[in-house]
Image (cartoon, helix red, strand yellow):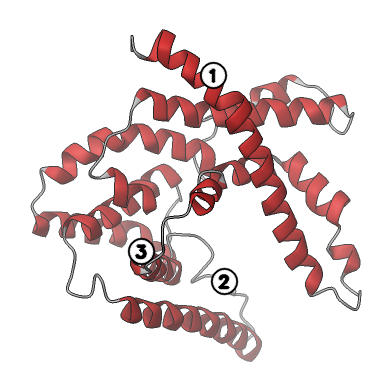
Amino acid sequence: MITGYFMCKSQITVQKFLKLLFEVLFYNILIYFVFVACKYEKFSLGGVINIIPCRYLCDNFTSCFLIFYLCIPFLNILINNLEQKKHGLLILLSLFIYTLHSSFPYMGVNMNYVSWFIVLYFISSYIRLYPCKYDRNTMFWMICTILCIILSVVSIISILWVNVRFGKDIFPYRMLSDSNVILALLTAVCSFMWFKNIKLPQSKYINMVGGSTFGVLLIHANSDTMRRWLWQDLLDNVGHYSDEYFWMRPIVAVFCIFIVCIVIDRLRIVFIEHPLFTYMKNKVLDVL
């Protein structure tokens, strides 16, 4: 949604896309060969193939985001040639396909993040191009966000009650289990509108952290091997479930992972990305 809100009035460049692609490749290659060198993972052809981005386009966020990013120039042509009413109808049709079918029993839709990102692009660009009368009302969107969170909790409790009362086996998080279901979408839109309107002063530190959040994702959720090493072997939160202060352990773990990944990504940006793309800008990108 953030991408759609800002990019609907902007354009991608070769340099922007190459930076994204280089970041993905850098962490895929580095993390894989570190695990191989430490003998935590065996070298294999399949492992090398997994380094390649966009090898699996379904629910892999990184691969789907890279492909979606290439669609932005064409999406901008579409939305800039739609009048407001048709833009709104396109959103309703998209939500009928993706959100209605995924949210209610006896209905279903095969999830594909590339097309779902495009739907979110339609929504966030509409918000940017056609602001409503509540667009700048921070209190309104804060209340809506809180209500959505309460409804989400109620939906989980209600499904659990139905399962126990009537002997059903309904997935308790059905209304939240993916980003296209109704309560997840409503919470995302309301929280986006709320935070969009919060007046925060410019801060180079916030921008620095924000510029490395994609790196945090690429590091800590890089592969099944990384998840096994991080959550099972290194942190082993499940193994400490009976500890007296277990409730504190996941909070500290998440905080530490975020900080360490931010530091790693900042080092990559300063010592590798900046010098590399400065050289490329002078030698290659100007030609492109």
When asked about the image quadrant of residue 240, the answer is bottom right
Q: Secondary structure at mark 2?
A: loop
Query: Mark 1 sits on what residue?
Result: 276
**Image quarter hosting the C terminus:** top left
Q: Amino acid at mark 2?
A: Tyr
Task: Kindly check if marks 1 and 3 are in contact, taking CB atoms under 8 A apart as contact.
Answer: no
The answer to whether residue 221 of the structure is visible from this angle is no
The circle on residue 173 is 2
Q: Position of residue 177 (x, y in %)?
A: 54, 64
Q: In front here: 263 or 45?
A: 263
The circle on residue 196 is 3
> Label 1 to label 3, Cα distance in Å?
33 Å
The answer to whether residue 33 of the structure is visible from this angle is yes
> Label 3 to label 2, Cα distance in Å?
27 Å
**Image quarter hosting the N terminus:** bottom left
Q: In front here: 109 or 36?
A: 36
For marks 3 and 2 on the same chain, the one whose residue lies earlier in the sequence: 2
Task: Kindly check if marks 3 and 2 are in contact, taking CB atoms under 8 A apart as contact.
Answer: no
Q: In the image, 284: left or right of 62?
A: left
Q: Amino acid at mark 3?
A: Lys
Q: Nearer the viewer, mark 1 or mark 2?
A: 1
Please determine whether, in this image, residue 122 is positioned above or below residue 193.
Answer: above
Q: Amino acid at mark 1?
A: Leu
Residue at 10 percent of width and 43 percent of height = 81
Q: In the image, 262: left or right of 38?
A: left
